[in-house]
Image (spheres, rainbow, N blue to C red):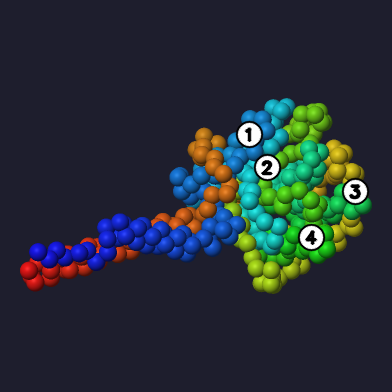
Amino acid sequence: MHIAKPLWPTGHRVRLLTACTTALLAIGVTAASPAAADDSVSYSFESPSQKLPFMAINGTGRVLVGPAPGGKGGHAARVNIPNDGRSFKSELVIKGLDAGRHRFSFANYLPGDWQPRDFDTIVTQWFSTQDDTSRIKPVMALSVHGGDWRLKVHWMSSGEIQEKIIPLGSARPGHWNRWTFDITWSSPSTPGSITVTRDGVNVGSHQGANNYHRGQPPHFRIGAYRPGWRPEKGPRHRTGSSEAVLYIDDIAITSTAAGSAPAPRPTATGGAASPSRAPAASPGPTATGSPSASPSTKAGTPSSSRAPAAVAPAPPAATFRATASGESSLPSTGSTGMVSVGIASAVALAGGVFFLLQRRNATRSARGAHRR
């Protein structure tokens, strides 16, 4: 009796199917890998299931999600630092960025009752973790000081930290500010660049060194940080100050190609049509001490700041909800979707291969039986 043989031996068929499945899964994951490997991420705070980045909180401050104030609509993150003698920082931390070129965009909002103070409230900073444990200043920090926005840039020269202060115009409590920072980090042999826009208008720039060229690449922190409120500095800056409350939204970090310059934007010229005053000339760099020295805050004189005539009240803190904190290296929703689609497609194709093998084997068997 002639017995029809399978097209391939059973063990060979299983090995072939396994190889096909593995290859197809690899193809699916590889198709999604550019989005996952690209250190780009975004947070809109609209989805209750979206995990926030890692939270860096010193004291009893909070980062909560709730209705966005100022007539913006949707949701935003509410950040606060209580004036309790020990709280001084409430930030979201996004790490895992390389030392290349990125565009950082985000929106922030100072409530209409924001109190101008003669010290820095840092709302965004780029911080480079160093190889040692010495306290060191962030390589870049956006802060509101008095009634004005300003950017501090730090770098190392001859063992000393150099500092440049770039004024970015008047703070406008009760107004959503939309910021974009196009940053190319410098290297020991290549100068870097910084271009800052606010509400679509170019308000500041810097060319040259912009980090310490050691340790890890700078990572991104956004929220609220008052260095003068650190407990070891005493109560000097806390007297008469209420808690710091502000809102953040629409965070997007995009890795950009080295040769793709950002689109040119109009330069602020002052006047009613401008979102802020024209930036004054930036002072030259000044040495601020050795890396091991504790950073000091030089008190300045707050400039006048006037809120818009009509300011929408901020929603009460009770309406905000806590959101789970996750690692900042998680891929964005888009890359996760690509991975899911790639895996689903691979499984479907593997199933199709298995079905065709089984059908061909059955046909071969039927032909053998017919010949008998």
Instruction: Report the front residue among 266 and 4.
Output: 4
Pointer 3 or 1: first along the chain: 1
**Residue drawn at the location 67% of the way across and 47% of the way down:** 221
| Image coords of residue 104 (percent x, y) | 65, 58
Q: Which residue does the numbered mark 3 point to in the structure image?
A: 160
Instruction: Give 79 or 103, whichever is nearer the viewer.
Output: 103
- Direction from residue 60 to residue 341 in the image, left or right: left
- The kind of residue tagged 4 is Ser
Instruction: Residue 369: tell me if it is visible.
Output: yes
Of the two numbered discs 1 and 2 on the same chain, state the one appearing first in sequence.
Answer: 1
- Count residues near mark 3 (Cα–Cα under 10 Å), then give few for <14, some for 14-19, many for 20+: some
Give the residue drawn at x 57%, y 49%.
329
Residue visible at 78% across and 38% down? Answer: 133
Q: Which residue is mark 1?
A: 61
- Nearest to N terminus: mark 2 or mark 4: 4
Q: Residues within 10 Å of mark 4 (few under 14, many from 20)?
A: some
Task: Return the residue at label 4.
Answer: 187
Q: Mark 4 falls on what kind of element? A: loop
Residue 334 appearing in the image:
no
Q: Position of residue 189 (x, y in %)?
A: 83, 63
